Amino acid sequence: MRIVVLTGAGISAESGVPTFRDADGLWEGHRVEDVATPEAFAWQPELVHAFYDLRRAALATVEPNPAHRALARLEEHLGDDLTLVTQNIDDLHERAGSRDVVHMHGELRSALCTTCGARSPHTASLADEPPCPGCATPTLRPDVVWFGEVPYELGRIERALETADRFVSIGTSGAVYPAAGFVQVARAAGARTLELNLEPSEGTDFFHEARHGRAGELVPAWVDQVLEDTLAGR
Ligand code: BV8
């Protein structure tokens, strides 16, 4: 059984990582779109560095939750038959034990050189412009995909969607593309589609089934059910 799982900010909410559309959806009085764009970085790099340095530092104050751990357990059983795609830039899937995580929007603990294009592990601040480990030029930016930029690994993701038996979306509002369109691609290819979210997402009508509640409860229960199904050959 080949499964594609897509996660969003909602899976990390119970770990204490703020989601994007929290109450005001604003960050320090800024529209997220105003700090997560290449234009914003060109115009006010210090503000953008402060935005990501703060989120990178906050990773040390949070832990994976039962939803992250359940997906790591699922990977143990399914191996390559599971493709775990996340829109999140936190490292909680990996810290829960998932080994193969497709970060389609990049990672907080990585830096991207705007001179040589190298991507390098980075845990400290970028505001003080450290040199690129590749070309030594002080032109590192957060290795995240900003609005207007092409997400990572779209080819691998599309191949997995086109051969999936099941597509499951967890903790995402379905507001940002191309991720929000994956359910339609998977469904058109014959996959059974399921939404696990606190509330109906913008794309909830595209799913065969939707279960609404907290990921920390819904995801472990769903993983138990899948493992039963696979053991029973269903
Ligand atoms: C691109 C990294 C060209 C940075 C991010 C088509 C139509 C309209 C617009 C577009 C379109 N195509 C492209 C666009 C433009 C744009 C876009 O979609 N704009 C939106 C605003 C309309 N898309 C782009 O610019 C993309 N690039 O299109 O390039 C292209 C593309 C493909 C092929 C060729 C060319 C790039 C978008 C990526 C931007 N970067 N993140 C950073 O993190 O700072 S996006 C960022 O926002 C996240 O990664 C995520 O994707 C999105 C936030 O959404 P969610 O994760 O869903 O979080 P949210 O807070 O919204 O919702 C949380 C949900 O969880 C809620 O539903 C809530 O109920 C639920 N929840 C809460 N608690 C719990 C819970 N659920 C369960 N349990 C809980 N406890």
Image (tube, helix red, strand yellow):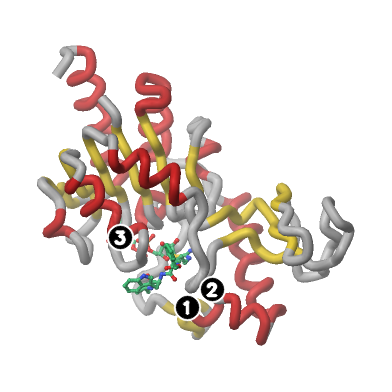
Relative depth, front residue between 92 and 136: 136
Q: Which residue is mark 1?
A: 33
Say which of marks 2 and 3 sits in front. 3
Task: Confirm whether residue 194 shows in the render.
Answer: no
Residue 20 versus residue 207 in the image, above or below: below
Q: Residue at x 50, y 63 (%)?
A: 150
Query: In the drawing, what numbered circle is on residue 180?
Result: 3
Q: Which residue is mark 2?
A: 36
Q: Up-down: is 203 above or below 29?
A: above
User: Is the C-beta of the residue carrying label 2 under 8 Å from the nearest atom of ligand 1?
Assistant: yes
Question: Does the numbered disc 3 mark a residue whose Cβ is under 8 Å from ligand 1?
Answer: yes
From what the image shows, is residue 219 above or below residue 51? Answer: above
The residues bearing labels 3 and 1 have C-alpha atoms spaced at a distance of 17 Å
Mark 3 vs mark 1: in front = 3
Query: Whereabouts is ligand 1, in terms of quadrant?
Result: bottom left
Query: Does dot 3 land on a helix, a strand or a loop?
Result: helix
2 and 1 marks in contact (CB < 8 Å): yes
Residue sitting nearer the eye, 202 or 200: 202
Ligand 1 contact, mark 1 (Cβ < 8 Å)? yes
Q: Amino acid at mark 3?
A: Ala
